[in-house]
Image: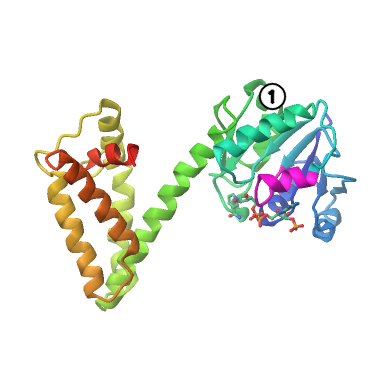
């Protein structure tokens, strides 16, 4: 049974890894990149050099941003073609891109890849997809070569909303971890001595136990009720202030923890200091 061809547009670290994964899964692969020489290694591995970015029926795009797609397709018609764009952008940019592709006769499926290039196609890899589900379903068997296909909804912006929600957590929690490591280093504690405790916190926050705060806050946010009898936001705002002061005392950067402190203090000043930590979301909802 012949497998359908897929064209990979954009051969940076991600696009190149995708082309390799499609080849490894036995697909015919065409490749296109603005800087044509980046296709050479893939052509050596068996890919076809596409004549243009729109050369193919299934066009998987992975570039720096959405304007790159507009530059790459230019004035080309996309009649009957499916464009799966896995580049980063804002949800509004993705919705606009869906209209742009539709205006040229094609259909856009958007996606956000949740793993770095070496993990593409490996166990545990997954991608959030949004757009018309029937179109995604037709190509899911092909896209599975990149990792699990996780459909999140018809609104083309949603793939990036999920992707960015994950990345906000990823960047901010790991930056807090780096503040913790810096504080430890200033105190003469090697990173490896602190690591087990950091690992325990990351794991327990996503679990069901007493420190399972992801679940606790999600339930509170849905109910709009934030019990704080045992650990009030006011108490935590004061405690966070001490942590910021401890960083300053140690001569460390405090911009991000200061911003957290301001957010907590605003929720407190708004009169919700007796509620729990979850009440901070009410302040986030009203900038
Ligand atoms: P880049 O974000 O640097 O993308 C490089 C590619 O974009 C190259 O093919 C480049 O072409 C192309 N490009 C940029 N601007 C234009 C343009 N105006 N016209 C045509 N082509 C253009 O590298 P990555 O491969 O790392 O990332 C691709 C996407 O995947 C990004 O949106 C990124 O956010 C996302 N992503 C990346 C991850 C990672 O770990 N790397 C993980 C998850 C998602 P040229 O070679 O000619 O410069």
Q: Image height check: is 41 above or below 229?
A: below
Q: Position of residue 113 (x, y in %)?
A: 58, 44
Residue picked out by circle 1: 135
Q: Which quarter shows the N terminus? A: top right
**Of residues 237 and 152, the one drawn nearer to the viewer in this rendering:** 237
Q: In the image as oriented, which residue stretches furthest toward the top?
A: 134
> Residue 69: horizontal and vertical position, in percent?
73, 44
What residue span does the magenta drawing correspond to?
Answer: 61-72
Residue 2 appearing in the image: yes
Report which quarter residue 100 is drawn in: top right
- Asked whether the viewer can see residue 22, the reply is no
Locate residue 109, reporting x and y percent.
66, 32
How many numbered marks are there?
1
* Position of residue 79 in the picture relative to residue 122 (left or right): right
Using the image, determine if residue 101 lies above or below residue 11: above
Residue in the image at 13% along x and 44% along y:
232
Dividing the picture into quadrants, the one containing residue 183 is bottom left
């Amino acid at each position: 049974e012949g497998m359908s061809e897929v064209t990979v547009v954009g051969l940076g670290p991600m696009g190149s890894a995708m082309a390799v994964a499609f080849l490894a899964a036995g697909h015919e692969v065409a490749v296109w990149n603005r800087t044509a020489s980046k296709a050479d290694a893939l052509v050596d591995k068996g890919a076809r050099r596409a004549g243009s970015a729109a050369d193919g029926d299934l066009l998987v795009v992975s570039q720096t941003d959405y304007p790159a797609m507009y530059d790459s397709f230019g004035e080309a018609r996309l009649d009957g073609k499916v464009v799966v764009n896995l580049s980063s952008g804002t949800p509004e940019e993705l919705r606009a891109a869906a209209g742009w592709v539709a205006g040229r006769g094609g259909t856009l499926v958007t996606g956000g890849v949740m793993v770095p290039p070496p993990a593409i196609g490996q166990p545990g890899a997954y991608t959030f997809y949004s757009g018309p589900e029937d179109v995604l379903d037709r190509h899911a068997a092909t896209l599975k070569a990149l990792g699990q296909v996780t459909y999140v909804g018809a609104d083309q912006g949603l793939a990036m909303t999920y992707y960015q929600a994950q990345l906000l957590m990823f960047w901010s929690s790991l930056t807090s971890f780096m503040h913790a490591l810096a504080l430890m280093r200033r105190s003469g504690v090697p990173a490896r001595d602190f690591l087990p405790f950091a690992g325990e916190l990351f794991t327990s926050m996503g679990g069901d136990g007493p420190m399972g705060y992801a679940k606790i806050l999600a339930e509170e946010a849905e109910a709009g009720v934030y019990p704080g009898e045992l650990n009030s936001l006011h108490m935590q705002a004061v405690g966070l202030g001490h942590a910021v002061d401890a960083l300053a005392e140690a001569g460390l950067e405090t911009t991000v923890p200061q911003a957290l402190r301001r957010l907590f203090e605003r929720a407190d000043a708004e009169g919700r200091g007796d509620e729990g930590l979850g009440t901070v979301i009410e302040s986030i909802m009203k900038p």
